[in-house]
Image (spheres, helix red, strand yellow):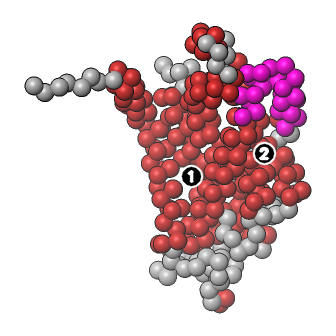
């Protein structure tokens, strides 16, 4: 006689919940558009070293500088004769790298500080809230400019500068989630059984706070892309010959060929817009499907 293995109710419920969230996410047109755009952009960034037409770090024939789009150079060339398609392709890769690293930095540090401030309260909350208020007192781009100026121009400086801007956002979000969760019944029960604060925070409170954190992180990637491009436009971004979308725009305007060779600003600006749009639409779709406060 065959033995019947019992089905774990938790696994069934988790699978059912995942399918429900998936259906709810795909029901939104903007979420589907954001998902498609994000996948395409990420694939372009990943495949850049394989499918690049030319080496973006080296100049072609200087006589071919500012050549309009042609069969050889689909998007034309820049002021140094470099292929614009290769530059834009690698620029997407660099911009995504900056955004992901900076948002990851802000997410990790901000979440940890928010967990401490919300759970332990007292002077921990006072100091962290004071630090958060100071950081939020500055406009984000001005704060990023200040940090990048102190650190000096470069890829790492941009990542750090944009990451610092993201920290107070995640501190406030995490702290508000912890304050609403720490007094709920299941946390009180775990605390009554003698669980230590570290276990309560990382095994119970943090998993319950992941949904809004994921949504905020997705939306922050678009914001980080804009801030990184702004720093690059001001000359505080990646150093040449590293291709970066904001730096490409800055070169075109600084050297005075933005209007005479519009293809040098059209594609970098368009790709910045598409990256921001993709992650904003994706974040909105995730918010509607993951955040219970936004569900209808």
Q: From the top left corner, tell me how far across and down residue 295 is, in percent.
A: 50, 21
Which residue appears at 74% of the width and 22% of the height? 118
Check disc 2 and report its element: helix, strand or loop: helix
Number of residues whose C-alpha sits closer than 10 Å to that of mark 2, classed few (under 14), some (14–19) or many (20 or more) = many
Say if 279 sits above or below 238 in the image. Answer: above
Is residue 183 toward the left or the right of residue 279 in the image?
Answer: right
Q: Label 1 belongs to which residue? A: 274
* Residue placed most toward the observer, 153 or 210: 210
Q: Is residue 108 above or below residue 48?
A: above
Of 54 and 125, the residue lying toward us: 125
Q: Are marks 2 and 1 in contact (CB under 8 Å)?
A: no
Q: Report the span colored magenta.
A: 112-135
Q: Quadrant of residue 24?
A: top left
Q: Position of residue 199 (x, y in %)?
A: 63, 26
Q: Is residue 56 left or right of residue 10?
A: right
Of 205 and 224, nearer the camera is: 205
Q: Position of residue 100 (x, y in %)?
A: 63, 51
Marker disc for residue 164: 2
Residue occupying the point 67% across, 65% down: 244
Where is the N terminus found, in terms of image quarters? top left
């Amino acid at each position: 006689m065959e033995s019947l293995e019992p089905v774990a109710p938790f696994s069934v419920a988790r699978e059912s919940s995942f399918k429900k969230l998936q259906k709810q996410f795909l029901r939104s047109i903007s979420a589907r558009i954001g998902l498609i755009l994000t996948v395409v952009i990420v694939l372009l960034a990943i495949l850049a070293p394989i499918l690049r037409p030319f080496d973006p770090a080296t100049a072609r024939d200087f006589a071919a500088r500012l050549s309009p789009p042609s069969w050889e150079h689909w998007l034309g060339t820049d002021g140094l004769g470099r292929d614009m398609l290769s530059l834009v392709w690698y620029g997407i890769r660099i911009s995504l790298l900056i955004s992901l690293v900076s948002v990851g930095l802000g997410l990790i540090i901000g979440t940890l500080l928010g967990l401490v401030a919300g759970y332990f309260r007292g002077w921990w909350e006072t100091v962290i809230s004071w630090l958060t208020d100071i950081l939020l007192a500055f406009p984000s781009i001005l704060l990023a400019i200040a940090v990048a100026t102190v650190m000096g121009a470069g890829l790492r400086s941009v990542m750090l500068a944009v990451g610092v801007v993201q920290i107070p956002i995640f501190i406030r979000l995490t702290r508000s989630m912890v304050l609403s969760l720490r007094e709920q019944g299941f946390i009180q029960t775990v605390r009554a059984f003698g669980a230590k604060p570290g276990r309560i925070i990382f095994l119970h409170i943090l998993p319950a706070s992941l949904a809004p954190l994921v949504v905020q992180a997705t939306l922050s990637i678009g914001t980080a892309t804009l801030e990184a491009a702004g720093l690059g436009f001001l000359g505080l971004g990646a150093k040449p010959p590293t291709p970066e979308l904001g730096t490409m725009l800055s070169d075109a305007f600084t050297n005075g060929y933005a209007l005479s060779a519009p293809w040098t600003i059209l594609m970098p600006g368009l790709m910045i817009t598409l990256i921001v749009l993709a992650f904003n639409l994706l974040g909105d779709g995730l918010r509607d499907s993951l955040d219970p406060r936004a569900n209808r």
